[in-house]
Amino acid sequence: FVSSNVASSSSVDSVFGVARGGGLFGGNRKEKEAVADVEDKLKAESGETFPALTQEEVEEWLGHIPVFAVTDSNGAGVVLKPDNSTSVMYFFFSPQMANATLAQLKSTNDSLDLKLSAFSLGKIWYKILNNKDQQEIKLKQPGADDSEAEVFTGGDVEYRIVPDTRDLLGARMLLTMTPEDGEEMKKAGDTMTPELAQKAVEKAMTESPEFKENYNEIPIFLIAQMRMQKPGEEGAQPKTILPMYFSLQTMVATWQQFMSAQADPELKDMEPAINVMNLHKLVDMMRQPSEIDFRSCLLLPPIPPTGAGGPGPSPVAAAAAPGADAMGGGSTLGDI
């Protein structure tokens, strides 16, 4: 876990794409201090230790999160070759980024019978993304006969899961923006220059201690003070839920909406603490006994942006398209 304090300002709209009034100003804290801070915030008040989640529970916890991949008409995943020695299949959280990859692949060959397919993150988490004992798979050129397929072990194909680029940038900025940087942006207000915004982005891209890769490092955001009430079953007491978000923009907008409805002036001025964590590390924590009740945490899927805005075309397919192969033979990814 890595935590960062937040204050309200309209000055970073152009950087984060959040609703007006949602500024993010960081603490740039040491990782160990941040981990201890967040774990302390999320500990159960009773002080009890909760049992580790099983693999089945983790799969269920992730099961409602959709990810997207380019496949053939039968649902067999498309494996790209960025170079002669690497075979990669990509999963995207953003359907816009996945569609951009699909469009780039089709632009190289109109005859390719490809489509966008949705998968459950829970079903692929252990079976594909984190499976060291994968079975053999067949790789062949699109439209080729099975007799032309080349057989590989599962470990010869690298599976990459790609976060939304805006959330990746948001995570990096949370980890690099100091209180001094935040004050500078607050003072600039609506007159913040593109140069000031670019300075913050460049710092995030070069100095972030985590989320340095564009894939497989998935940021998850939460506000420790924010809770939801889940109605109890059959007359039972409502259950308090801690929401966790893939989308920084959605989380900040939800917080702003909640705070705007508060009648107490002190509550309206409350500054939340935004925390960001790596999904892989979070799952590793869930598999261990913990003072955090992870069974009371709800992971909220990304909400696709409305309107014309959104991530630009994915750079992935541009380099990989010429050597695209289709993964087929036996059970396909679409069957999982």
Image: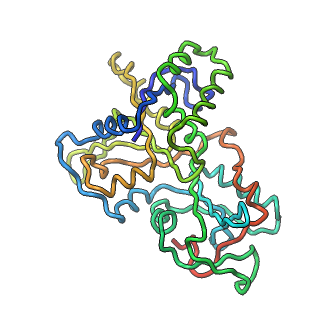
Left or right: 83 with respect to 255? Answer: right
Q: Identify the residue at image location x=71%, y=64%.
A: 81
Relative height, residue 278 to residue 159 (above, below): above
Q: Identify the residue at image location x=57%, y=79%.
A: 136
Relative height, residue 68 to residue 323 (above, below): above
**The N terminus: image quadrant:** top left
In this view, the residue in front, 152 or 73, is 152
Picture quadrant where residue 311 is located: top right
Relative height, residue 218 to residue 67 (above, below): above
Left or right: 210 with respect to 310? Answer: left
Picture quadrant where residue 68 is located: bottom right
In the image, farthest residue toward the bottom: 147
Q: What's the colour scheme?
A: rainbow
Q: Identify the residue at image location x=36%, y=65%.
A: 56
Q: Position of residue 116 (x, y in %)?
A: 65, 61
In this view, the residue in front, 133 or 64, is 133
Left or right: 50 with respect to 175? Answer: left
Picture quadrant where residue 89 is located: bottom right
Q: Position of residue 71 (x, y in %)?
A: 66, 67
Q: Position of residue 130 (x, y in %)?
A: 48, 64
Q: Position of residue 87 (x, y in %)?
A: 66, 66
